[in-house]
Structures are given as structure tokens and as C-alpha cells.
Image (cartoon, rainbow, N blue to C red):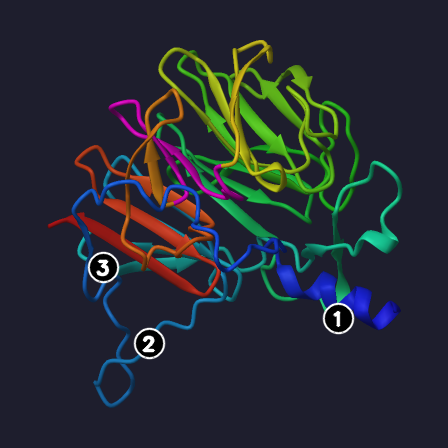
Amino acid sequence: MRIHYLALLAFGACGFLFSQPGSAPSPGSDAPDLGYKLAPDWPNPPRNAAGSPGVWNMIQVASVAVGSDGRVLVLHRGAHPILEFDTTGKLLRSWGDGTFSEGKVGAVVPAHRAPGASGYSAVYGAAGCDSCGAHSVRVDPEGNTWLVDAPGQVIYKLNPQGKVILQLGEKGVSGMGPNRFNLPTDIAFAPGGEFYVTDGYGNPRVVKYSHDGKFLLQWGTRGSGPGEFQLPHNVAVDAQGRVYVSDRENRRVEVFDASGKFLSEWPNIGGVSGLWMTKDQHIWTGGVLRDLNGKAIGKLPAEAGGAGGPHGITATASGDVYVALLSGVAQKFVKK
């Protein structure tokens, strides 16, 4: 049984285990096609020593972000975990070695869970892997890059020159205090400069901070009722300051006001990992685009992760969409 348990821990690397009946249509599958196509050769294939094109050896692409200068940051769980490309797919630089923990998040079988406990934990050391802590990359409106190291229990804010100017959490120390996390997952920025952290795999909460990183408030307990979470995996904020949280294992998105008051939920939309608020105030829930009432208005092609959807997603003001797949692929979708 112990071997089976460790195998499950090593399996997921922040993936998820859901049983979905093969005959049931995936949520959002009946949404209209938005007219996107997969951009060929993005990113551009690497060249081997002989000059012929090869393939990227990305290890579980977890997240993707676009900077104000148009550079595309691809976060994966391997050496050189942050790859920067231009919009044409040309590699600009790679960096981040040593930044992320080697811990690996995975599912805990029900027989090993304490009552009311999370369904996820992490394994470290030889059973982990290089940069497996890499979970989310975001770029804020001021051009700073934010990195979420889930099993490392930390979040870093880097200025445009790449210097760490803020660290939330204590590396390697879990908790549930104002500056302690338990496997945090994502971050999003409010119009007033505050930001929210989903915390996450180990803790069932959302934490709100001031612009300079001071703790303001938190909300959430474990469960499936209004304002409760089983796995708050991603977060997005609209122009009015409403907060959207993907409660992945409860297969829904919950909506809150800026003080954490529950407003509504979008049930039965699937185990969504990636969220992204577009400039025109629509929200990508995985590969399905919705209005702010939760109505599906369109979808990406099936290449964008199929029924499970991408682990990470972002979009530019012009409408290009980038997705991160745990299969080790980063993709760009453009309008036909």
C-alpha cells in the first residue's frame, strides 16, 4: 500500500485525478468554435548541431504569461524552467535554474487522508524532480514577473530587471498564517493594486494582500458549499474587482467580491485549471471562453488540451491565446 501511495504522489506533479465517464460530453463541448487555429511552429523548433530542426524537451508546461513588451514566458518543470519567446516563437533567453523546489505535488489516495484533509500532498528529495515546484507565472500591470513555487511554499516578485523584490512565504515551511502557505497555486491582480493568492493544494483559502505585500484578509474552508473550496487552483479578477476562483475538484468557478463575500458559482463546468480574464472582460476557463455570468460563448480547438483543458492559459489584447499543457507542450492559437 505504501508503494501505491508514493506512486500516486509521484504521478501528478500538480495534475489531477478525476474519473470522467467516456460517454458524457465534456462541459463546454457544445460551445461554438471561435475560429482559432493552432499557430504552426510556435515556438520555433530548436536546431541540433547538424542544423536540422528538433523538438523542445519541455517537462510538464505548467503556466504561460505575456509581458507588456510582448515577450511570452513559458514555465515548465525542468532545467531552464523559464523560457522567453517573442511572438513569432523565437527563443530570446532561458533562466530560472535553482529557483524552484524539487518537491512534487500529487494526489493522496482516500485511505490515507485524514477527515477533512486535502486530497494532495508533496514528496521531496529523490522522489521529487528538478523544478517540479514550478506552478504559475504571471506578469502584473507594472511589468513585474511573479513566480509561484507550490511545494516550495513561496511566491516571488521580480522586477523587470529580474531581481527578486518581494518574497511571500518561507521557503520549505508550510502553514496557514499571513506569510505561510501550504502548496500555493496562483496569483491575480486587482484594479486597485491589491493581489490575491490561491492557497491551494494544501490549504483551502484565498489570501488578499496590499500592493506592497501586506496581509489584508483571507477566506475559505474545505468543503463544497458556497465560499468553500476543495482545491482553489486558479484566480482571476475583473475590472470591477470581483474575484473568480476555479475550485477544481468541485468542478466549478466561484465568484466573490473584493472582501471575500460569496456572490455566485458556475457549477458543473469541469475540473478547470487555467483561468484568464481578457481585456474585454471575458474569462477563459480552460479552453472555454465565458461571459462574466458563466455562459460559454466559445471554445478553442481540441488541440488545446481536449476535455481536461490546459493547466495554464493567457491571452493578448489582440486576441492571441497561449496555453500550457502538462503533456510538455506550449501552444499559440490565432484567429483564422
The answer to which quarter of the image holds residue 205 is: top right
Q: Pointer 1: what residue?
A: 126
Chain-order first, disc 1 or disc 2: 2
Image coords of residue 228 (percent x, y): 68, 25
Image coords of residue 15 (percent x, y): 59, 55
Image disc number at residue 89: 3
Packing grade of label 2 (10 A; few <14, some 14-19, many >=20) is few
Q: Is residue 232 visible?
A: yes
Q: Pointer 2: what residue?
A: 55
Image coords of residue 87 (percent x, y): 20, 51
The Cα–Cα distance between marks 1 and 2, rounded to whole angstroms, is 27 Å
| In the image, residue 280 lies in the stretch drawn in magenta | yes
The Cα–Cα distance between marks 3 and 1, rounded to whole angstroms, is 34 Å
Quarter placement of the N terminus: bottom right
Chain-order first, disc 3 or disc 1: 3
Q: Nearer the viewer, residue 132 or 24?
A: 24
Q: Are marks 2 and 3 in contact (CB under 8 Å)?
A: no
Q: Tell me: residue 175, above or below residue 111.
A: above
Q: Tell me: residue 157, above or below residue 264.
A: below
User: What residue type is disc 2 on?
Assistant: Val
Residue at (64, 66) in percent of width and height: 129
What segment is highlighted magenta in the picture? 269-286
Which SS does the magenta portion mostly show? loop
The answer to which quarter of the image holds residue 320 is: top left
User: What residue type is disc 3 on?
Assistant: Gly
Q: Nearer the viewer, residue 235 or 143?
A: 235
Packing grade of label 3 (10 A; few <14, some 14-19, many >=20) is some
Q: Are marks 3 and 1 in contact (CB under 8 Å)?
A: no
